[in-house]
Amino acid sequence: MITSRDTADVLSMKFEAKFSNSPTFEYFVIMNAIASGYTLILLFFPAKSSCGHFILVLDLIIALLLDSSISACLAIGQVGKKGNSHAGWLPICGQVPKFCDHVTGALISGFVAAIIYFLILLYSLHNLMNLFTTSQD
């Protein structure tokens, strides 16, 4: 997403599209950076840590924030691609196709990463539940 940038000349005015022009795209980048940093920090925690519940709750929060950032970007991307005739917003992807291609690629990879993160979260939840059922027996 950070490398998405393109310029176009519209009515002899130079128009530059970049991710930092939209708070939604910035939110997407920030949330992915936070999720990546959090996941890297968790790699150094022992597998049978005593704060398993807390880590699981943080994992769930990160997964929800990732999903919200992707959803917001999809909405803005749809407006950029199709426009909104009711609001009078014109589509911009015809003028800046390189920008739109980069955003599409970032959203696809973010969506795949969010699915993988969710599957890992389900696996962690399953392991934590098995840990409690075997320790209570």
Image (cartoon, helix red, strand yellow):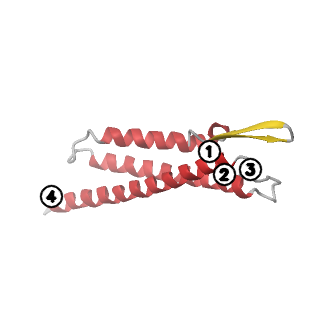
Residue at mark 4: 135
Q: Are marks 2 and 4 in contact (CB under 8 Å)?
A: no
In the image, residue 101 sits, relative to residue 41, either above or below, namely: below
Q: Position of residue 89 (x, y in %)?
A: 79, 52
* Rendered residue at 34%/56% (across/down): 120
Measure the C-alpha gap from mark 3 to mark 1.
16 Å
| Closer to viewer: mark 2 or mark 4 | 2
- Looking at the image, which residue sits at the far left? 137
Q: Amino acid at mark 4?
A: Ser
Measure the C-alpha gap from mark 2 to mark 1.
7 Å
Q: Amino acid at mark 3?
A: Ile
Which labelled disc corresponds to residue 92? 3
Residue at mark 2: 76
* Rendered residue at 60%/44% (across/down): 25
In the image, residue 107 sits, relative to residue 17, either above or below, namely: below
Between 50 and 78, the one nearer to me in the picture: 78
* Rendered residue at 43%/49% (across/down): 61
Q: Position of residue 126 (x, y in %)?
A: 28, 61
Q: Are marks 2 and 3 in contact (CB under 8 Å)?
A: no
| Closer to viewer: mark 2 or mark 3 | 3
Which labelled disc corresponds to residue 24? 1
Q: Could you tell me how many numbered marks the image carries? A: 4
Q: Residues within 10 Å of mark 1 (few under 14, many from 20)?
A: many
